[in-house]
Image: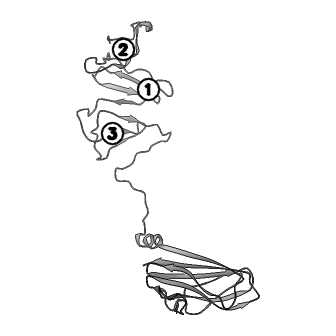
Amino acid sequence: MPVTHNSDSLETRNLTVNDALLLGDATPIEFRTMAAPVTPPSGSLTVYAKTDGRLYVKDDTGAAYDLTTGATGGADVAVADGGTGASTASGARTNLGLAIGVDVAAASHTHAADDVVSGTLDGARLAVKNRTLTKIVYIENPTATDSFPVTFLADAVTIVQVRGVTDVGTVDFNIEHRATDAPDVAGTNTLTADLQAGASGAVSTSFADATVPAERWLNFNASAVTASPTKLWVAIEYTID
């Protein structure tokens, strides 16, 4: 491909796609040196060679960047932030021979290499939350003699709280944990006292035995009912030990 100048004319009928794309070691691109050009229109970049023998790019804000600085190598790429500053992974200006202009429409967006988002992460609390589960039970027309298993726990757990709410009236109940092979045999109450669930809801965090071994049934045991509730919801929250 021949060397061109801005005063040369070009007959496009003689230019093929291969002429434009097949540029390799044997066909370098040559730029004639010149004074800095005028600022290009919005959304455009101008690439040119100055009389100092270096290649530059000028953006539509008028900022010019030397594309050949540090072209001898280096692992970092310098990023020029809208002409306001530069940052690299190591803080050095060494780059791969490329400056990237970023117009963020703000006065300045430079950041130190070691900037991090402020704040802390409570690892212990997060670990607990990640292993916290809730078993929800819905019981229609509960009676004072209701007693049945609501879930089987393969892992050892610690019960965090038990919550209950009815549509009307009240239901008193406790949650037992029972042996693996004896879900029909009375076990150990988890709550210190029966919880009385009402239409406004009730919650208990007072436990006689919150620690449940692995391979145990949790059993719902009602002890009293008033005002004929037709719906009861129970939520048992626990963490896997």
Mark 3 sits on what residue? 78
Label 1 secondary element: loop
Mark 1 or 2 closer to N-term?
2
Q: From mark 1 to mark 2, how far is it between C-alphas?
A: 23 Å
Point out residue 101 in the picture as x, y percentages from the top left corner: 41, 35
> In the rendering, at what x and y percent does residue 175 appear?
56, 87
Position of the N terminus by quadrant: top left
**Residue 225 x, y percent position in the rendering:** 71, 90
Determine contact: label 1, label 3, CB under 8 Å: no
- Viewed as shown, does residue 106 lie left or right of 89? right
Q: Nearer the viewer, residue 174 or 67?
A: 174
Q: Amino acid at mark 3?
A: Ala
Count the labels in the image. 3
Q: Amino acid at mark 1?
A: Leu
Sooner in the amino-acid sequence: mark 3 or mark 2: 2
- Chain-order first, disc 1 or disc 3: 1
Q: Which residue is mark 2?
A: 19
In which quadrant of the rendered view does residue 82 lie?
top left
